[in-house]
Image: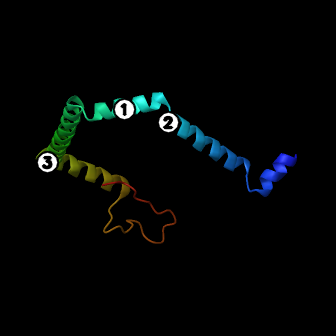
C-alpha cells in the first residue's frame, strides 16, 4: 500500500508504467542481435540489384496496367455512347417511354398529370 501511495505522489500511474515498460522493451528489441542482423539483411536486400530491378519492373507493370484500364474505360464509354445512339436503343427507349406514359400518365416538367383536387397523387420515382 505504501509503494502505491508513493507512486501516486510521484505521478506514476499504471498507464505510465505500461508506457515505460513498452518503451524499454522496444529499445531492448532494437539493440538485440536478431533485430540488428535482420535489419542489416533487409538493408542488403533493399540495395541489391535484384530488388531494384523487381521494384522497377513492378512499377512499370503498374503504370502499364493503369494505362490499359484507362483505355478500356474509354472504349467502353464510347461503345455505350454509340449503343445509346443506335436505332435499336432509340426504339427501346421509345417503347419504355410509352409504357411509362400509360402507367404513370403524362407529365410536363415534373408536374402531376392529375388535377390538384385529387386526394391520391401519383409519385414518379422512375429513373427515365
The numbered mark, 1 or 2, whose residue comes first in the sequence reads: 2
Whole-Å distance between the Cαs marked 1 and 3?
53 Å
Place residue 43 in its image quadrant: top left
Residue that label 3 marks: 78
Residue that label 2 marks: 31
Q: 95 or 44, which lies in front?
A: 44
| Secondary structure type for disc 3 | helix
Q: 120 or 90, which lies in front?
A: 90
Mark 1 or mark 3, whichever is nearer to me? 1
Q: Which residue is drawn at 42% across and 70% down?
A: 115
Task: Estimate how packed mark 1 is, as few (under 14), some (14 to 19) or many (20 or more) residues with alpha carbons within 10 Å.
Answer: few
Residue that label 1 marks: 40
Q: Residue furthest bottom?
A: 116
Mark 2 or mark 3, whichever is nearer to me? 2
Q: Which residue is drawn at 78% across and 51% down?
A: 7
| Secondary structure type for disc 1 | helix
Measuring from the top left, give residue 40's x and y in whole percent.
Answer: 36, 32
Res 91 label: none
Whole-Å distance between the Cαs marked 1 and 2?
12 Å
Whole-Å distance between the Cαs marked 2 and 3?
60 Å
Q: Residue at x 37, y 65 (%)?
A: 113
Task: Estimate how packed mark 3 is, as few (under 14), some (14 to 19) or many (20 or more) residues with alpha carbons within 10 Å.
Answer: few
Instruction: State whether residue 111 is above or below residue 6.
Output: below
The numbered mark, 1 or 3, whose residue comes first in the sequence reads: 1
Amino acid at each position: 500500500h505504501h509503494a502505491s501511495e508513493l507512486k501516486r505522489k510521484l505521478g506514476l500511474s499504471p498507464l505510465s508504467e505500461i508506457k515505460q515498460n513498452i518503451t524499454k522493451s522496444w529499445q531492448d528489441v532494437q539493440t538485440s542481435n536478431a533485430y540488428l542482423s535482420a535489419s542489416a539483411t533487409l538493408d542488403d536486400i533493399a540495395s541489391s540489384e535484384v530488388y531494384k530491378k523487381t521494384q522497377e519492373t513492378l512499377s512499370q507493370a503498374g503504370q502499364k496496367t493503369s494505362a490499359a484500364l484507362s483505355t478500356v474505360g474509354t472504349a467502353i464509354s464510347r461503345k455505350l455512347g454509340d449503343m445509346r445512339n443506335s436505332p435499336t436503343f432509340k426504339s427501346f427507349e421509345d417503347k419504355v417511354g410509352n409504357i411509362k406514359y400509360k402507367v404513370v400518365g403524362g407529365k410536363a416538367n415534373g408536374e402531376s398529370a392529375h388535377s390538384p383536387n385529387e386526394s391520391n397523387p401519383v409519385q414518379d420515382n422512375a429513373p427515365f
